[in-house]
Amino acid sequence: MEKSQKFHLIGLGTSQMPDLALALQMAGHSVTGSDDHFSTGASEKLQKNNLMPLKAGWFPENITKDLNKIILSPTVTAGNAELSRAQELNLPIISFAEYIYLHSQDKQRVVIVGSYGKTMITALIMHVLHFHGRKFDYLVSANVPGFDTQLRLSMAPLIVIDSQDARASVLDKTPSFLKYQHHIGVIPGIEWQPSDSYPTKEEYISQFRQFGASTPKGGVLVYFELDSVVAALSKMDRSDVQYIHFKTHPSDYQEGKELLLTEEKQRLPVKITGKHNFQNLSAAQETLKKIGITSEMFYQAVPSFEGIRN
């Protein structure tokens, strides 16, 4: 077990940072944090676990020499008073993504990236693994029925990561998804939208090109072959990587309802329907095959999947 440490989270109120604070606390660490704004959901979760700071804001006095690590949210901007103080004291500062990787170095890492579909695919994989009693960790950016948090860190041998394309932190411009160093990478689709991080389409696409190229020897890349950009990125012609493409999962209609058509041509009722969701189902199925879940097991679990709650 990791020796107890003192962590301070700058940007505690954003994204999965409250769940990270809880995970660290459950592992026996001392945890503090700060932010200038907390959503109702974040406040409730932090207060319930005695992790909510006394008041919102940035306070340099929170940063003391006895802290072992500072974990930085991607939303923290340059000139943040607490970040500046941590730099003055030369304390170890890492991004949220970097901490997740450090905790998961000895795990098999499944990383789902892209502009759309990745959260639903992650949730599907989580549901199927949970249905069959598999032990795994996860990071997902939505609430998934059957799971109390958006982040779990344990001693499980596998982690499934719904990864963002945002920069890891103000100090590290590497995209978060490159930090996780995937063994199995999944790319459902890429669609560029102008942003401060990626002002040009080529700059945005190049990050995913790096993701594909960083697949390790013996690794797997699962991609949507009908997305022309993704298909082009995935054809790296590396004999030491397994490339698996997926299409929209076959379906059929019966009494006005869309049903999943299994490999045995059985009609299976599911709670999520539509073209994009049937693409997500196919992506999850192909990914799960690489971590020991057969098609039969997949079809047993999928009918009870309820979708995600943002």
Image (cartoon, rainbow, N blue to C red):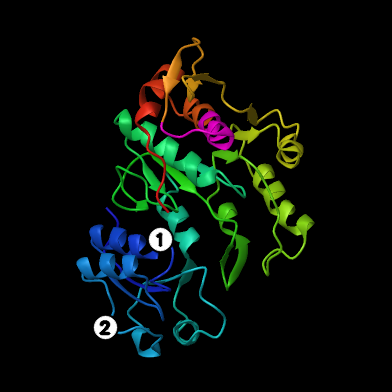
Q: Which residue is mark 2?
A: 54
- Amino acid carrying label 1: it is Gln
Give how far across and how far down residue 131 sits, in percent: 31, 30
Residue 282 within the magenta-colored segment of the rendering: yes
Classify 61 as above or below 102. below
- Where are the magenta residues, as a range? 271-283
Residue 149 within the magenta-colored segment of the rendering: no
Give how far across and how far down residue 117 sits, in percent: 55, 43
Q: Nearer the viewer, residue 93 or 10?
A: 10
307 relative position to 181: left or right? left
Residue at 40% from the left image edge and 50% from the top image edge: 309
- Residue 64 makes an appearance in the image: no
Q: Quadrant of the C terminus?
A: bottom left
- Amino acid carrying label 2: it is Leu
Comes first in the chain, label 2 or label 1: 1
278 relative position to 236: left or right? left
- Give the image quarter of residue 2: bottom left
Give how far across and how far down residue 275 sits, in percent: 58, 33
User: Helix, strand, or loop for circle 1?
Assistant: loop
Residue at 44% from the left image edge and 60% from the top image edge: 99
Q: Count residues near mark 1 (Cα–Cα under 10 Å), then give few for <14, some for 14-19, many for 20+.
A: some
Mark sitting on residue 16: 1
Farthest top residue in view? 264
User: Helix, strand, or loop for circle 2?
Assistant: loop
Residue at 26% from the left image edge and 63% from the top image edge: 25
Classify 57 as above or below 263. below
- Give the image quarter of residue 229: top right
